[in-house]
Image (cartoon, rainbow, N blue to C red):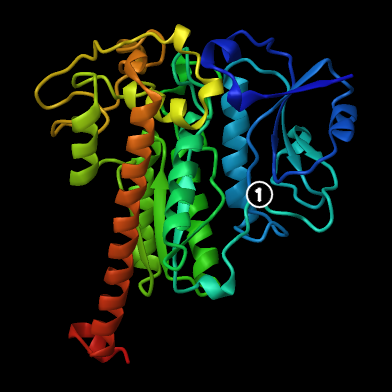
Amino acid sequence: MTDFFAYDTLTWPDIAALSRDVPLVIPLGQGYDQVQVASALSNPPRVGLLPVIPFGWRGSGLVVAEELLGQLVANLLDSLRDDGFSRVYALCPPGLELGLGPARIALLQPDPFKPVLPLPADGDRAKVVLIPVGHTEQHGHHLPMFTDTVLIEAISRGVTGMVPAQAVTLPVFPYGVSTHRASFAGTLNAGGRAFEDFWLGVIGSLVNRGFTRFYLLSGHGGNCSFLVNVVKYAGERYPHSFCATAWLYLSGPEGVAALQKHRRSAIGGMGHAGELETALMLHLQPGLVQMERAIDETDFIATPSYYMDWVEGGTLVANPPWADDSATGAYGAGSLGTAENGRIWLEAAIAEKIQHVAEIQEQYQRRMARREEGFGLWGNVR
């Protein structure tokens, strides 16, 4: 009988140790029958299930052009092939081709299709649509691959739980961009251009349904510059909407103050898989944190204009190979993370995002009011 295991709960060393002929499957949607999946793969001893892609195809409740979704999925599969995995597949509902050829497995899902999380309804059009984007990537030797996804999902759901009249959230998307992935086997990469095109397509689909306010939330630093581009494209293409993003979380004045008040590490201790992410995971998913395997790495090659911490410092922007600065994939002092600090910092992150939601609402409303008054060039387009 085939053993199915959750790829995203493993650590990077666990992924690196996998046999390269074990089948790895990315499902589009959930609810597929595992017996049928195993049969389609000729009943191998083990199958790794990667995180579910929650939407994007007809029937999922939120549709983008098939070529946009197809390119993103192809890039994810290619990143696994680049690491030597020889049997990688996308598990799709019938009728969805995506241009993947033999890497596509088509199986029926339960009818009717049930989304991972209820999608925004027409009655939510006056709310800010939160779009949480995580990732599936290495987090040192002690944190699981889905760390970024877990954290940004908790923040997004925390916001909608606190201000349900002001915000609604999409299901968290578990794949982003990792340009450093070649150094650390098993890290996925959606590809920068395909990632941008996909998210612009998502926003366009929501705009066509009457939604006007969007907040792209990233749990992964590698996504952020690409999400800035999405926001810029969206602002030009959809001028009657307001679309925003921010650097991760706990990056504003109050958030940084919360980090400084409670952190135990010096600058350099919170870059990646360091004190902050470890603390948050100890609070949210303690059973998946292997503290005995935490290795602190804080010897980033730092200069006054370029150094590494949670809020990256200095005026220089660069992207050198991670292997220059980290042997284990960690940037920071994960051993100093505590569950109590994780609780404090999660509450501070949610509060920060609630404030951003309020500002997005204010920005949208004031801009629409100014246009109605005929301000500037808007007076010529009534």
**Nearer to the camera, 226 or 274:** 274
Residue 23 percent coordinates (x, y): 74, 22
Name the residue furthest front: 340
Residue 257 percent coordinates (x, y): 18, 38
Residue, disc 1: 116
Q: Is residue 118 above or below residue 339?
A: below
Residue at 59% over, 24% down: 9
Q: Residues within 10 Å of mark 1 (few under 14, many from 20)?
A: some
For the C terminus, the quadrant is: bottom left
Residue 293 percent coordinates (x, y): 46, 8
Does any portion of residue 21 appear in the rendered image? yes
Name the residue furthest left: 304
Residue at 25% over, 77% down: 366
In the visual, does 265 lie left or right of 128?
Answer: left
In the visual, does 102 lie left or right of 314?
Answer: right
**Nearer to the camera, 213 or 339:** 339
Q: Is residue 365 above or below residue 236?
A: below
Residue at 61% over, 48% down: 69
Q: Quadrant of residue 258?
A: top left
Q: Quadrant of residue 311?
A: top left
For the N terminus, the quadrant is: top right
The amino acid beneath tag 1 is Val
Q: Secondary structure at mark 1?
A: loop
Q: Is residue 193 above or below residue 357?
A: above
Residue 310 percent coordinates (x, y): 27, 30
Q: Quadrant of residue 152?
A: top left
